[in-house]
Image: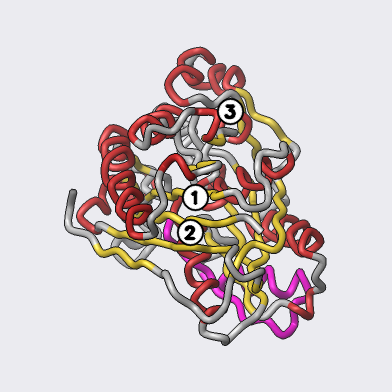
Amino acid sequence: MRNQQETGITTSPYAVGIAGAGYYVPSKILTNAEIGMRIGIPDEWVRTRTGIRERRIAANEEATSDLAVRAGLAAMKSASITPDQVDLIIVATLSPDMQFPATACIVQEKLGCKRAAAFDVGAACSGFIFALSIAEQYMKSGTYSTVLVIGAEVFSRIIDWEDRNTCVLFGDGAGAIVVRRVEPGTGIISISLGSDGSGAELLKIPAGGSRQQTSYETVRNRLYYIKMAGKEIYKFATNSVVMALRKELARQHISCDDISLLICHQANVRIIERIAGKLSLPMDKVFVNIDKYGNTSAASIPIALCDAILQGKIHKGDIVVFIGLGAGLTWGSAIVKWT
């Protein structure tokens, strides 16, 4: 494993957990067949290699904040709270409405959460786990009592639709949770985070920041779109992430047999199956919905969580494990005893 830094959270005077969840995906469906007509890749090729059949694409008038607001409203309704009860809004995204201000501030205004602080987290496909860890820390310190955590992406705006390696992978969507104090003995058991900057070149958008200024060359070379080294990401996902989770499970004296449901970042079904295999988890304990939505980056875990709840796959007392992994390189896991 590469050099890494990991952060674990184990003790607190408060029990903190997920009090409500909601999601929103755009109505427009883009199938593999439709993409294949553009770039000449058959539907079967995409399905067998990624598990993706279709994805959602935001309408021209929809920005990331619009999706985030819809998901946030659904989560607040699920938790039976009003906008004035929200203390903090954290939006995990790599596709903000604009470079600044933070998309979370736009979401705060649209939701009417007048007393809430708001900021973004940019940890790529691990962003939801990172945002959840921040929410937990604020709540366990006693600073806040209600935090709205949202993962939202409109990746269709930063995909190179001429790049056969990436354009079939991503979709748009948003998922949100409300984090509040819960019954003692339930809620978040542990969160572990990791980063490895030596892999920063594996998944990136080269231009648009202070490293490469806007120029004729950066536009011509399509440097404002996602560039990815897929094979290296696969190796990282199926090695470092699994080792980190095993370490955290052992630290919490939890075995893989105790896991009721594993919800991975929905990057690729082969990655998910490989992770499950390494953890000796049967696939009926692993939630997969990448076939419907593709890779929605920071939104994929909360969208999958909502889908799992709707399908009746999560019950009170279940041990639910989230795994996120993405650009940075970053990774994170959360172990939750469902309330």
Dot 1 crowding, Cα within 10 Å, few <14, some 14–19, many 20+: many
Residue 153 location (% of width, % of height): 57, 51
Span highlighted in magenta in the image: 100-124
**Residue position for label 1:** 322
Which of disc 3 and disc 2 is earlier in sequence? 2
Residue 205 location (% of width, % of height): 37, 51
The answer to whether residue 210 is magenta is no
Query: Would you say the residues marked 1 and 3 are in contact, meaning their CB atoms lie under 8 Å apart?
Result: no
Residue 216 location (% of width, % of height): 36, 51
Q: Quadrant of residue 79?
A: bottom right
Numbered disc 3: secondary structure: helix
- Residue at image point 61% right, 70% down: 184
- Residue at image point 70% right, 63% down: 19
Instruction: Mark 2 vs mark 3: give the one in front.
Output: 2
Q: Does 163 appear above or below 203?
A: above
Q: Is residue 224 left or right of residue 97?
A: left
Q: Nearer the viewer, residue 85 or 124?
A: 85
Instruction: Mark 1 vs mark 2: give the one in front.
Output: 1
- Residue at image point 64% right, 29% down: 30
The dot on residue 249 is none
Query: Would you say the residues marked 1 and 2 are in contact, meaning their CB atoms lie under 8 Å apart?
Result: yes
Numbered disc 2: secondary structure: helix
**Residue position for label 2:** 129
Dot 3 crowding, Cα within 10 Å, few <14, some 14–19, many 20+: some
Instruction: Mark 1 vs mark 3: give the one in front.
Output: 1
Q: Nearer the viewer, residue 7 or 126?
A: 7
**Residue position for label 3:** 291
Q: Does 53 appear above or below 177?
A: above
- Give the amino acid type for the residue marked by disc 2 in the picture: Ile
- Give the amino acid type for the residue marked by disc 1 in the picture: Phe
Dot 2 crowding, Cα within 10 Å, few <14, some 14–19, many 20+: many
Residue 39 visible here:
yes
